[in-house]
Amino acid sequence: MTTTTDPVTPAAGAATAELKPGARFRRVGGALSLLGAGTLTFVSLLMIPYENQTHAEYLQTGVDHTTNILWAAVVLHFGYLLLVPAAFTLVRLARRTAPKLSMTAMVLAGLGSGLSGIIVVDFYDVALANSLPADQALEIWNLAGSYGQGAIIAASSVLGMALGINLAVFAAWRARAIPVYPLVLNVVGWAVFTLFSGDAWLPSIGTGLVAIGLAWAGVIVLRTRDEVWDRL
């Protein structure tokens, strides 16, 4: 096991009595957020059997798989939300050994919380695709996407979360709290998800790698003793 999470032997059970209030709740909650964030994101993409190479294909997906997309958006919303406490949990593992890096990761992950709000756009896209002829729906969709202000919100949210969660995993690895494998899985997974977002299956494979990496870290946090966690 690593240095940060190595269990220690408390003196006559005194450590348990001296734990800060809510220490176990924060540890278990952080572990569950790590387990749930990547898993829900991965599951949400599996719910949408789509081709997304063009904007027209994307909108047609809203017609062909309406129910799948609407429920996938709900699942993805909670997956993205859980990425924030997941990142904060990793930051806690590294905050003493890499404070500047941890703070940067925390700020970026906070900016990335906007991802869950962007998901609401899926409902409008589905409504467009099902209410208007394909050419008109595509015209309005392109017009909405042309506004630069929306691009600022989307870019800061996507890049903020992608960089934030990976920096948090890196910081936890650098602090020797987790092995290198979760870091590799997360970096590769996010790269695949970002670079091949138009493919039918590669984004799901990418988020699957992220889910394994975050769950790995979550199991480590879950198995950490309360007195060790309380001292981090």
Image (tube, grey):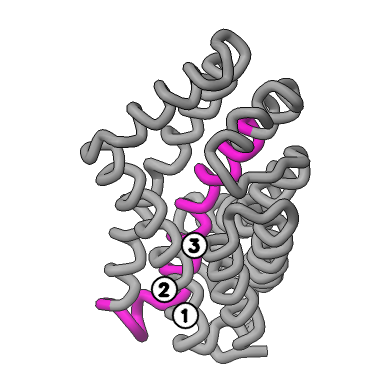
Number of the label disc, if any, that sits on residue 121: none
- Looking at the image, which is closer to me, 51 or 184? 51
Residue 12 picture quarter: bottom right
Distance of label 2 from label 1 (alpha carbons)? 5 Å
Percent x, y for residue 204? Answer: 71, 56
Q: Which residue is mark 2?
A: 167
Label 1: few (<14), some (14–19) or many (≥20) C-alpha neighbours in 10 Å: many
Query: Given the image, on which type of amino acid does mark 2 rest?
Result: Leu
Percent x, y for residue 4? Answer: 53, 84
Residues in magenta, as a range: 73-100
What residue is shown at x 57% (from left), y 34% (from top)?
56
Distance of label 1 from label 3 (alpha carbons)? 13 Å
As for residue 76 lying within the magenta part, the answer is yes
Question: Which quadrant, please, contains the C terminus?
Answer: bottom left
Q: Which residue is mark 1?
A: 170
- Looking at the image, which is closer to me, 103 or 4? 103
Percent x, y for residue 113? Answer: 40, 45
Query: Given the image, on which type of amino acid does mark 1 rest?
Result: Phe
Q: Earlier in the sequence, mark 2 or mark 3?
A: 3
126 versus 116 height, above or below? above
What residue is shown at x 49% (from left), y 62% (from top)?
89
34 versus 102 height, above or below? above
Q: Secondary structure at mark 1?
A: helix
Q: Residue 11, can we see it?
A: no
Overall secondary structure of the magenta section: helix
Pointer 2 with pointer 1, Cβ within 8 A: yes
93 versus 55 height, above or below? below
